[in-house]
Image: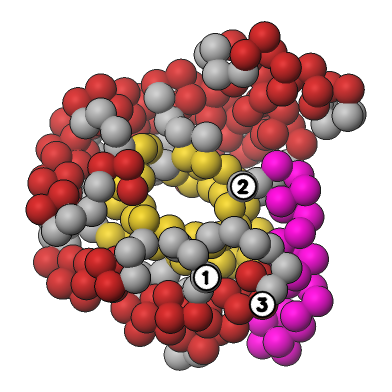
Amino acid sequence: MLIVGERINTSRERIRPVVEKRDKEFIRNEARIQIEAGANMIDVNCGTRVQEEPEDLEWLVKTVQEVIDMPLCLDSPSPRALERALGAHKGRALVNSITLEKERMEHILPLIKKYDAKVVALTMDDRGMPNDSKTRVEIAGKLVEVLEGEGIKKEDIYFDPLVRPVGTDPQQSLMVLEAIKIIMEKFPGVHTFCGLSNISFGLPLRSLINQNFLTMALAMGLDGVIIDPLDKRMMSSLKASFALLNKDEFCLEYINAFREGKLV
Protein backbone atom coordinates (compact mmCIF):
# COMPACT_ATOMS: atom_id res chain seq x y z
CA MET A 1 0.00 0.00 0.00
CA LEU A 2 1.38 3.37 -1.04
CA ILE A 3 0.66 6.01 1.61
CA VAL A 4 1.65 9.46 0.38
CA GLY A 5 1.88 12.28 2.91
CA GLU A 6 0.11 15.38 1.60
CA ARG A 7 1.19 18.08 4.07
CA ILE A 8 3.93 19.82 2.04
CA ASN A 9 1.58 21.80 -0.16
CA THR A 10 1.52 25.58 -0.57
CA SER A 11 -2.27 25.54 -0.61
CA ARG A 12 -1.94 25.01 3.15
CA GLU A 13 -1.83 28.29 5.02
CA ARG A 14 1.26 27.39 7.05
CA ILE A 15 3.30 26.02 4.16
CA ARG A 16 3.15 28.85 1.63
CA PRO A 17 5.10 31.41 3.71
CA VAL A 18 7.61 28.73 4.69
CA VAL A 19 8.35 28.03 1.02
CA GLU A 20 8.53 31.75 0.26
CA LYS A 21 11.09 32.23 3.04
CA ARG A 22 12.98 29.04 2.13
CA ASP A 23 12.68 27.72 5.70
CA LYS A 24 14.50 24.42 5.26
CA GLU A 25 14.14 23.20 8.81
CA PHE A 26 10.35 23.55 8.81
CA ILE A 27 10.03 21.59 5.55
CA ARG A 28 12.46 18.93 6.72
CA ASN A 29 10.48 18.48 9.92
CA GLU A 30 7.20 18.22 7.97
CA ALA A 31 8.75 15.42 5.93
CA ARG A 32 10.14 13.61 8.97
CA ILE A 33 6.94 13.65 11.02
CA GLN A 34 4.92 12.29 8.10
CA ILE A 35 7.27 9.34 7.67
CA GLU A 36 7.23 8.70 11.42
CA ALA A 37 3.41 8.73 11.32
CA GLY A 38 3.29 6.01 8.66
CA ALA A 39 3.69 7.61 5.22
CA ASN A 40 6.02 5.77 2.86
CA MET A 41 6.27 8.60 0.33
CA ILE A 42 6.10 12.40 0.60
CA ASP A 43 4.18 14.60 -1.82
CA VAL A 44 5.61 18.02 -2.71
CA ASN A 45 3.25 20.57 -4.22
CA CYS A 46 3.72 24.30 -4.75
CA GLY A 47 1.15 24.81 -7.50
CA THR A 48 -0.41 27.87 -5.88
CA ARG A 49 2.81 29.80 -6.63
CA VAL A 50 2.47 29.52 -10.39
CA GLN A 51 5.25 31.89 -11.45
CA GLU A 52 7.74 30.53 -8.92
CA GLU A 53 6.72 26.88 -9.18
CA PRO A 54 9.77 25.55 -11.12
CA GLU A 55 12.23 27.01 -8.61
CA ASP A 56 10.03 26.15 -5.63
CA LEU A 57 9.52 22.52 -6.62
CA GLU A 58 13.22 21.98 -7.25
CA TRP A 59 14.00 23.51 -3.85
CA LEU A 60 11.43 21.32 -2.11
CA VAL A 61 12.82 18.17 -3.70
CA LYS A 62 16.37 18.97 -2.62
CA THR A 63 15.31 20.03 0.87
CA VAL A 64 13.15 16.98 1.59
CA GLN A 65 15.62 14.48 0.16
CA GLU A 66 18.35 15.87 2.39
CA VAL A 67 16.58 14.18 5.31
CA ILE A 68 14.34 11.56 3.67
CA ASP A 69 16.13 8.84 1.73
CA MET A 70 13.24 7.82 -0.51
CA PRO A 71 11.55 8.85 -3.76
CA LEU A 72 9.00 11.66 -3.73
CA CYS A 73 5.66 12.32 -5.37
CA LEU A 74 6.08 15.40 -7.60
CA ASP A 75 2.65 17.00 -7.70
CA SER A 76 2.41 19.41 -10.62
CA PRO A 77 0.80 19.74 -14.06
CA SER A 78 3.63 22.06 -15.18
CA PRO A 79 6.23 20.53 -17.51
CA ARG A 80 8.70 23.29 -16.58
CA ALA A 81 8.33 22.60 -12.88
CA LEU A 82 8.52 18.85 -13.36
CA GLU A 83 11.66 19.15 -15.49
CA ARG A 84 13.43 21.12 -12.77
CA ALA A 85 12.22 18.81 -10.00
CA LEU A 86 13.04 15.58 -11.83
CA GLY A 87 16.51 16.87 -12.62
CA ALA A 88 17.15 17.38 -8.91
CA HIS A 89 15.41 14.21 -7.70
CA LYS A 90 17.30 11.17 -6.41
CA GLY A 91 15.76 7.81 -7.32
CA ARG A 92 12.57 7.09 -9.27
CA ALA A 93 10.01 9.79 -8.63
CA LEU A 94 6.25 9.42 -8.88
CA VAL A 95 4.96 12.10 -11.26
CA ASN A 96 1.49 13.32 -10.35
CA SER A 97 0.12 13.49 -12.98
CA ILE A 98 -0.61 12.75 -16.62
CA THR A 99 -3.96 12.50 -18.44
CA LEU A 100 -5.14 11.47 -21.89
CA GLU A 101 -5.41 15.15 -22.81
CA LYS A 102 -3.33 15.76 -25.92
CA GLU A 103 -1.35 18.72 -24.60
CA ARG A 104 -0.46 17.17 -21.27
CA MET A 105 0.47 13.86 -22.89
CA GLU A 106 2.77 15.61 -25.37
CA HIS A 107 4.61 17.60 -22.71
CA ILE A 108 4.74 15.30 -19.69
CA LEU A 109 5.14 11.83 -21.20
CA PRO A 110 8.65 12.64 -22.55
CA LEU A 111 9.71 13.69 -19.03
CA ILE A 112 8.40 10.46 -17.52
CA LYS A 113 10.40 8.48 -20.07
CA LYS A 114 13.54 10.63 -19.79
CA TYR A 115 13.73 10.30 -16.02
CA ASP A 116 12.29 6.75 -15.76
CA ALA A 117 9.58 7.97 -13.40
CA LYS A 118 6.47 6.24 -12.15
CA VAL A 119 3.24 8.04 -12.95
CA VAL A 120 -0.18 8.90 -11.60
CA ALA A 121 -2.58 8.75 -14.55
CA LEU A 122 -5.84 10.66 -14.18
CA THR A 123 -8.82 9.08 -15.95
CA MET A 124 -9.54 12.24 -17.92
CA ASP A 125 -9.28 13.22 -21.59
CA ASP A 126 -9.96 16.31 -23.68
CA ARG A 127 -13.68 16.01 -22.94
CA GLY A 128 -13.04 16.86 -19.29
CA MET A 129 -13.75 14.96 -16.08
CA PRO A 130 -15.97 11.88 -16.56
CA ASN A 131 -19.23 11.45 -14.68
CA ASP A 132 -19.58 7.67 -14.77
CA SER A 133 -17.45 4.63 -14.06
CA LYS A 134 -17.67 3.32 -17.63
CA THR A 135 -15.93 6.38 -19.08
CA ARG A 136 -13.29 6.28 -16.36
CA VAL A 137 -12.48 2.66 -17.20
CA GLU A 138 -12.45 3.34 -20.95
CA ILE A 139 -9.94 6.17 -20.48
CA ALA A 140 -7.84 3.96 -18.22
CA GLY A 141 -7.72 1.36 -20.97
CA LYS A 142 -6.52 3.90 -23.52
CA LEU A 143 -3.92 5.21 -21.07
CA VAL A 144 -2.60 1.70 -20.48
CA GLU A 145 -2.27 1.21 -24.22
CA VAL A 146 -0.43 4.51 -24.74
CA LEU A 147 1.84 4.25 -21.71
CA GLU A 148 2.76 0.61 -22.29
CA GLY A 149 3.42 1.46 -25.92
CA GLU A 150 5.94 4.01 -24.71
CA GLY A 151 7.72 1.46 -22.54
CA ILE A 152 6.12 2.24 -19.18
CA LYS A 153 5.33 -0.88 -17.19
CA LYS A 154 1.90 -1.49 -15.70
CA GLU A 155 3.33 -1.71 -12.21
CA ASP A 156 4.57 1.87 -12.60
CA ILE A 157 1.08 3.23 -13.40
CA TYR A 158 -1.19 4.55 -10.63
CA PHE A 159 -4.69 5.31 -11.89
CA ASP A 160 -6.55 8.14 -10.21
CA PRO A 161 -10.31 7.76 -10.91
CA LEU A 162 -10.93 11.40 -9.98
CA VAL A 163 -12.90 11.69 -6.77
CA ARG A 164 -15.65 14.32 -6.93
CA PRO A 165 -17.86 15.73 -4.13
CA VAL A 166 -20.67 13.44 -3.09
CA GLY A 167 -22.48 16.49 -1.67
CA THR A 168 -23.15 17.85 -5.16
CA ASP A 169 -23.53 14.53 -6.99
CA PRO A 170 -24.55 11.57 -4.79
CA GLN A 171 -23.58 9.08 -7.52
CA GLN A 172 -19.93 10.08 -7.56
CA SER A 173 -18.77 7.93 -4.67
CA LEU A 174 -20.38 4.87 -6.25
CA MET A 175 -18.89 5.71 -9.66
CA VAL A 176 -15.38 6.00 -8.25
CA LEU A 177 -15.68 2.80 -6.20
CA GLU A 178 -16.94 0.88 -9.21
CA ALA A 179 -14.17 2.29 -11.41
CA ILE A 180 -11.49 1.23 -8.90
CA LYS A 181 -12.85 -2.31 -8.80
CA ILE A 182 -13.08 -2.70 -12.58
CA ILE A 183 -9.69 -1.12 -13.28
CA MET A 184 -7.94 -3.43 -10.81
CA GLU A 185 -9.69 -6.47 -12.32
CA LYS A 186 -9.37 -5.51 -15.99
CA PHE A 187 -5.74 -4.35 -15.99
CA PRO A 188 -3.79 -6.69 -13.69
CA GLY A 189 -0.55 -5.17 -12.48
CA VAL A 190 -1.64 -1.52 -12.39
CA HIS A 191 -2.37 0.41 -9.20
CA THR A 192 -5.19 2.74 -8.19
CA PHE A 193 -4.53 5.93 -6.28
CA CYS A 194 -6.56 8.88 -5.07
CA GLY A 195 -6.82 11.88 -2.82
CA LEU A 196 -9.80 11.42 -0.54
CA SER A 197 -10.68 14.92 0.55
CA ASN A 198 -12.70 15.90 -2.53
CA ILE A 199 -15.39 13.36 -1.65
CA SER A 200 -16.46 15.35 1.43
CA PHE A 201 -16.17 18.88 0.05
CA GLY A 202 -18.96 21.11 1.36
CA LEU A 203 -20.14 18.65 4.01
CA PRO A 204 -19.90 18.90 7.81
CA LEU A 205 -17.49 16.64 9.71
CA ARG A 206 -15.56 15.92 6.53
CA SER A 207 -13.14 13.57 8.24
CA LEU A 208 -15.93 11.08 8.96
CA ILE A 209 -16.89 10.91 5.29
CA ASN A 210 -13.24 10.59 4.27
CA GLN A 211 -12.54 7.74 6.69
CA ASN A 212 -15.52 5.68 5.59
CA PHE A 213 -14.88 6.30 1.92
CA LEU A 214 -11.28 5.16 2.38
CA THR A 215 -12.42 1.84 3.85
CA MET A 216 -14.84 1.30 0.96
CA ALA A 217 -12.19 2.16 -1.63
CA LEU A 218 -9.70 -0.24 -0.05
CA ALA A 219 -12.30 -3.00 -0.28
CA MET A 220 -12.58 -2.28 -4.02
CA GLY A 221 -8.82 -2.69 -4.44
CA LEU A 222 -7.39 0.81 -3.92
CA ASP A 223 -3.69 0.46 -3.15
CA GLY A 224 -2.45 4.05 -3.08
CA VAL A 225 -3.71 7.13 -1.27
CA ILE A 226 -2.59 10.67 -0.56
CA ILE A 227 -3.60 11.70 2.96
CA ASP A 228 -2.42 13.52 6.06
CA PRO A 229 -0.69 10.72 8.00
CA LEU A 230 -0.91 12.82 11.17
CA ASP A 231 -4.68 12.25 11.09
CA LYS A 232 -4.76 9.43 13.63
CA ARG A 233 -8.34 8.45 12.89
CA MET A 234 -7.57 8.10 9.19
CA MET A 235 -4.47 6.03 9.88
CA SER A 236 -6.45 3.91 12.35
CA SER A 237 -9.02 3.26 9.62
CA LEU A 238 -6.21 2.13 7.34
CA LYS A 239 -4.84 -0.32 9.90
CA ALA A 240 -8.29 -1.74 10.67
CA SER A 241 -9.11 -2.06 6.96
CA PHE A 242 -5.86 -3.91 6.24
CA ALA A 243 -6.70 -6.39 8.99
CA LEU A 244 -10.25 -6.93 7.70
CA LEU A 245 -9.14 -7.30 4.06
CA ASN A 246 -6.47 -9.93 4.79
CA LYS A 247 -3.66 -7.50 4.01
CA ASP A 248 -2.19 -7.74 7.50
CA GLU A 249 -1.13 -11.30 8.31
CA PHE A 250 -2.49 -12.37 11.70
CA CYS A 251 -3.36 -8.66 12.26
CA LEU A 252 0.21 -8.06 13.42
CA GLU A 253 0.43 -4.48 12.13
CA TYR A 254 -2.89 -3.68 13.78
CA ILE A 255 -1.77 -5.19 17.10
CA ASN A 256 1.60 -3.40 16.98
CA ALA A 257 -0.11 -0.08 16.22
CA PHE A 258 -2.39 -0.64 19.24
CA ARG A 259 0.57 -1.39 21.51
CA GLU A 260 2.32 1.74 20.31
CA GLY A 261 -0.75 3.85 21.07
CA LYS A 262 -1.35 4.78 17.44
CA LEU A 263 -4.98 3.65 17.21
CA VAL A 264 -7.89 5.90 18.16
Identify the secondary structure beneath mark 1: loop
Q: Is residue 32 magenta?
A: yes
Can you say whether 153 is above or below 19 in the image?
above
Question: Mark 3 or 1, which is nearer the eye?
Answer: 1
Q: Earlier in the sequence, mark 2 or mark 3?
A: 2
Question: Which disc, if any, is residue 63?
Answer: 3
From what the image shows, is residue 80 above or below residue 186? below
Question: Depth check: 203 or 186 in front?
Answer: 186
Residue depicted at x 66% and y 19% = 240
Residue that mark 1 sits on: 90
**Is tag 3's residue or tag 1's residue first in the polypeptide sequence?**
3
Q: Position of residue 3 (x, y in %)?
A: 57, 43
Labelled pair 3, 1 in contact (Cβ < 8 Å): no
Whichever of labels 1 and 2 marks the residue nearer the N terminus, that label is 2
Q: Which residues, given as a range, are shown in magenta?
A: 11-38
Q: Which image quarter: residue 155? A: top left
| Quadrant (top left/top right/bottom left/bottom right) for the C terminus | top right
Residue at 72% across / 89% down in the picture? Answer: 21
Q: Secondary structure at mark 3?
A: helix
Three-letter residue code for mark 3: Thr
Please tell me the numbered disc located at residue 35. Answer: none
Q: CA distance from mark 2 to mark 3?
A: 17 Å
Relative placement, left or right, of 155 versus 33 is: left
Asked whether residue 202 is in view, the answer is no
